[in-house]
Amino acid sequence: MLETIILDTAKEELLIPEGRYAKMRNVWAIPSPRLLTKWLADSGFEKIEILNITKTTSNEQRKTDWVTFDSMDDFLDPKDNTKTIEGYPVPVCAILLAQRN
């Protein structure tokens, strides 16, 4: 099972953000589901199934009593909540299931 950020498009695309993506330091490339499926197949995985694609919400990534630092709302463009603070599409999460023999 794989859970990762994807680029929400039907095309085979790859987003390579310049600098940061949604203020995250550990995001180097964001594939579309089609490209991610191809990467898995090229790596020897079979029976690849996309179980879920969901836009990440502020309710899911929010400040709490235990997590008081920046939250999702701090990572979005204050004038356009469909974009990150850097101008990229908002995070979308995909869950995939694949087998490797």
Image: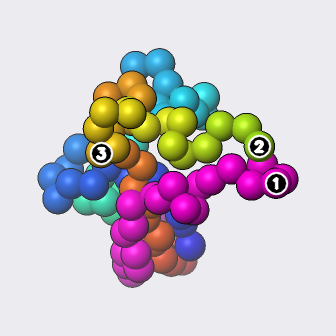
Question: CB atoms at circles 1 and 2 under 8 Å apart?
Answer: yes
Tell me which numbered mark, 3 or 1, is placed earlier along the sequence.
1
Q: Secondary structure at mark 3?
A: strand
Q: Position of residue 67 (x, y in %)?
A: 78, 49
- Residue visible at 47% across and 59% down? 57
Q: Nearer the viewer, residue 67 or 41?
A: 67
Q: Secondary structure at mark 2?
A: loop
Q: What is the distance, in whole Å, between disc 1 and disc 2 at their CAs?
A: 6 Å
Marks 3, 2: nearer the viewer: 2
Amino acid at the residue labelled 2: Thr
Total labels: the figure holds 3
Q: Which residue is mark 2?
A: 68
Q: Position of residue 40 (x, y in %)?
A: 41, 60
Q: Residues within 10 Å of mark 2 (few under 14, many from 20)?
A: few
Q: Quick one: which residue is furthest to the right in this view? A: 66
Q: Quadrant of the N terminus?
A: bottom right
Q: Which residue is mark 1?
A: 65
Q: Quadrant of the C terminus?
A: bottom right
Q: Is residue 31 above or below residue 96?
A: above
Amino acid at the residue labelled 3: Thr
Q: Is residue 69 left or right of residue 85?
A: right
For residue 82, the mark is 3
Magenta part of the protein: which range?
A: 42-67
Question: CB atoms at circles 3 and 1 under 8 Å apart?
Answer: no
Q: Nearer the viewer, residue 46 or 78?
A: 78
- Residue visible at 39% across and 25% down? 86
- Residue visible at 48% across and 76% down? 97
Q: Position of residue 88 (x, y in %)?
A: 32, 34
Q: Quick one: which residue is furthest to the left in this view? A: 11
Q: Quadrant of residue 93?
A: bottom left
